[in-house]
Image (cartoon, rainbow, N blue to C red):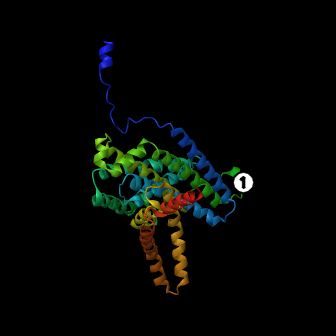
Amino acid sequence: MSATRAALPPKRRQVDADDRPVDPRRGSTLLRHLVVVLAVGLLLVAVSYTVEPFRNFQLATVAAYFCATAGLTVLTGLNGQLSLGHGALMATGAYTVALCQNAFADRGMTGGWLLPLSLGAAIAVTVGVGAVVGVAAARLRGPYLAGVTLAVAVVVPALAVTFDGVLNGEQGLSVPVEPPPVALGPYFPYERWQLWLCGAATLLALLLLANLVRSRYGRTFRAVRDDEVAARLAGIHVARTQVIAFVVSAATAGLGGALLAVLAQSVSPGAFSLTLSLFLLMAVVIGGLGRLAGALWGAVLLVALPDLTHSVTELLTLSPAVAQRLEGNLPLAIFGLTLIVVMIAAPGGVQGLLSRLGRRLRARRS
């Protein structure tokens, strides 16, 4: 019996994304990501003590947008799904955290654990919405997929007007947030606390995303993006992979929207219009599609653009009506021109350009 068994050819191993050998570098990758996150966290704390309160608020806003752009990078850059509805997913997270915080305030509940609980609820609700949209998106391709996400971007903010009894229509909802912990001192700047809060949430989300991208799920995302037929022949469940990518992206978008609501202490449908979804998509393309570091440049651009627009309108001598109209349309024009210039000069985005420059410098040194 043993001789017969030995004579048999070895059983062919199935080539499947769920049956891959364990990468021996996975532990070192996780450790490296942890070190980077801790270093960036310490840097944020140090910077928060050296800049003025408004800059702390801007950095906190960058962190909130970074959550959304990082998730969209995973969806579009790594998995190849085009989404024009991430502004609506951010609105879902923002309204959820507003409803939770108001419910806690009405019941007189206090405590430092309430806001993390509200943020967790925002992520959970957005994950549910993302799963529903992701299942539909997994059956569509190209312009049909973009059309579905575009419809989501239009419909979700409109629900605030339809259910004005709960969501207060165009006026929106306030987001009551407790002051910084007493242990930080009675005169601790609130903007610094906002930066700490948003920075901690964003770094945790990025740690999870970075490890996801380097795991077998990240490899299946890229395989489906590059060639769905080849991925299916390799044993990858394409539809399930696409739904997972959409859910992950929705979770980070919901967290980003919730953080923006906490920063503004209010939420309204006008803050999450279709324009925001277009800005998010253009931001990740300009920053570097498919790179988490590129998503950071996109988030910085989203925050810097309003200041740039305001500075341009101040330099021009215009009537108040024309200045208001220009300030409303100028950001989209600047974004479009920047996108065209970047695609011509640096097709890989800002991060791709920096990577090429870094490689050239290393080559010259060697």
Quarter where residue 83 is shown = bottom left
Q: Badge 1 is on which residue?
A: 185
Viewer-closest of 39 and 319:
39
- x, y percent for residue 232: 29, 43
- Left or right side of 359 for 185: right
Extreme residue in the top direction: 1
- x, y percent for residue 319: 49, 87
- x, y percent for residue 210: 50, 48
Quarter where residue 151 is shown = bottom left
Q: Residue at x 30, y 24 (%)?
A: 9
Is residue 6 in view from this perspective?
yes
Mark 1 crowdedness (10 Å alpha carbons): few <14, some 14-19, many ≥20: few
In the image, residue 347 sits, relative to residue 14, either above or below, namely below
- x, y percent for residue 81: 35, 55
Quarter where residue 57 is shown = bottom right
Q: Residue at x 46, y 49 (%)?
A: 123
**Quadrant location of the C terminus in the rendered image:** bottom right
In the image, residue 220 sits, relative to residue 293, either above or below, namely above
**Quadrant location of the N terminus in the rendered image:** top left
In the image, residue 311 sits, relative to residue 12, either above or below, namely below
Amino acid at pointer 1: Gly
Viewer-closest of 126 and 48:
48
**How many tags in the picture?**
1
Is residue 110 in view from this perspective?
no
Viewer-closest of 158 and 303:
303
Residue at disc 1, secondary structure: loop
Q: Residue at x 42, y 46 (%)?
A: 218
- Left or right side of 100 for 227: left
